[in-house]
Image (spheres, helix red, strand yellow):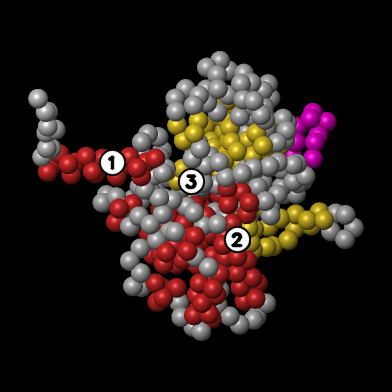
Amino acid sequence: MVIRPRRLPAAALAAFALAALFFALAARGGMGAGRDAVDVSAKDGFIKWVDFTPPYWLLKKTLDLDVGSRHVQGGGGDGAAYDWIGLLAYLGAKYGGDFKRCREKDLTALTARLDAGETIESITCDMKNFGYYMEAYTAVLGGFVGGYRVQTEGPDGEKVWQERYGLKAFSPVAKGYYYNDYDDFGVSRTYGYRRRHLGHDLMGSVGTPIIAVESGTVEELGWNQYGGWRVGIRSFDGKRYYYYAHMRRGRPYHASVEKGETVTAGDVIGYMGRTGYSLAEDVNNIEDPHLHIGMQLIFDESQKEGSGEIWIDMYAITRLLSHNRSAVYRDENKEYHRTYAFEETRSRFVEVGDQKNLALADIKLARHFLDG
């Protein structure tokens, strides 16, 4: 007797096809570049997914254009003031987030239009997804560039203050300390359960001083079975949560770091190690010393923990931040400190953020510097 397979109903076939598509996309690490803004933004008003893929060369080029244009204008010269996030958002909207299609000539053509008197608003008014990319990329980079004051060496070796505009976020590894890395975001991890690696590993030596990338508030501090001794710092605008993990056994943190307190970009917050992968505290179960750093985006507090978390690839970002590394020194108690003091003026997100976040950030920033 020949047994003929049953023909599935059309509805079942459609459901199967949809499920297959979903799991194929999940296997690739999410919906990824090219998702429409209507798909990544929730109907309740906040973004639910960000795939941040601008390559290093483009981050560096747009940053240089932004900083260079402000210096020209500050010196009384002519020309447009470029906003690097606006430039990136335009290119993201143009190519649906697929930056493999982007070329430097695209950026050159855009800046030529801006130099000719057009505005980013007029250029992008008919771009369906520009608003999404602008909000998403501002959430990633909003605290990286702006005005600040920093101490430098004077002609006689004394420390003097200088006012500057530029990159004010720091590399997470102190100046003068070697590390190596590669783009490991999304690779498989198996401890506890099979999962994707949602951070970036910087391989180095035990005891290497770890630096706060951005100013913010310490939200988490202590042991985690996966990350070992770890620190979680929330940016003042609330959009970015930095996760630093696998810190040194025995003395993982800088003495000044406490939960609920604030840190300044460039401060020493702890020391590289290999703790983690253990239910018991203060255990070295990581084979190679390294810093795991992650950036989580939070558009709504419901995304802080759970299935709605948004983590981004920091490989290109850490390459960019390597241009701004915090110099440190060691005191008599073997604690490390930053060499040059640093103070921020208003962060870049002030220009594009909502008034609630603006007021909250200004209050926190003012309180932080008044407290010393």
Q: At x 41% / y 75%, what residue is drawn?
A: 123
**Residue sitting nearer the eye, 319 or 258:** 319
**Tag 2 residue:** 57
**Callout 1 environment at 10 Å: few (<14), some (14 to 19), or many (20+)?**
few
User: Is 152 positioned to the left or the right of 351 in the image?
Assistant: right
Q: Nearer the viewer, mark 2 or mark 1?
A: 1
Q: Secondary structure at mark 2?
A: helix
Q: How many marks?
A: 3
Q: At x 49% / y 60%, what residue is drawn?
A: 100
Determine which quarter of the picture holds residue 263. Answer: top right
Determine which quarter of the picture holds residue 14. Answer: top left
Q: Amino acid at mark 3?
A: Ile
Classify 361 as above or below 29. below
Q: Nearer the viewer, mark 3 or mark 1?
A: 1
User: Is 44 positioned to the left or the right of 105 in the image?
Assistant: left
**Tag 3 residue:** 312
Chain-order first, disc 2 or disc 3 = 2
Q: Which residues are magenta?
A: 328-338
Question: In the image, residue 113 lies at what x, y percent?
Answer: 49, 80
From mark 3 to mark 1, how far is it between C-alphas? Answer: 25 Å
**Residue sitting nearer the eye, 58 or 248:** 58
* Magenta region includes residue 331: yes
Q: Amino acid at mark 2?
A: Trp
Q: What is the quadrant of the C terminus in the image?
A: top right
Q: Nearer the viewer, mark 2 or mark 3?
A: 2
Q: At x 51% / y 57%, what residue is drawn?
A: 54
Q: Amino acid at mark 1?
A: Ala
**Tag 1 residue:** 20
Chain-order first, disc 2 or disc 1 = 1
From mark 2 to mark 3, how far is it between C-alphas? Answer: 18 Å
Give the residue at the far right of this rendering: 156
Classify 284 as above or below 18. above
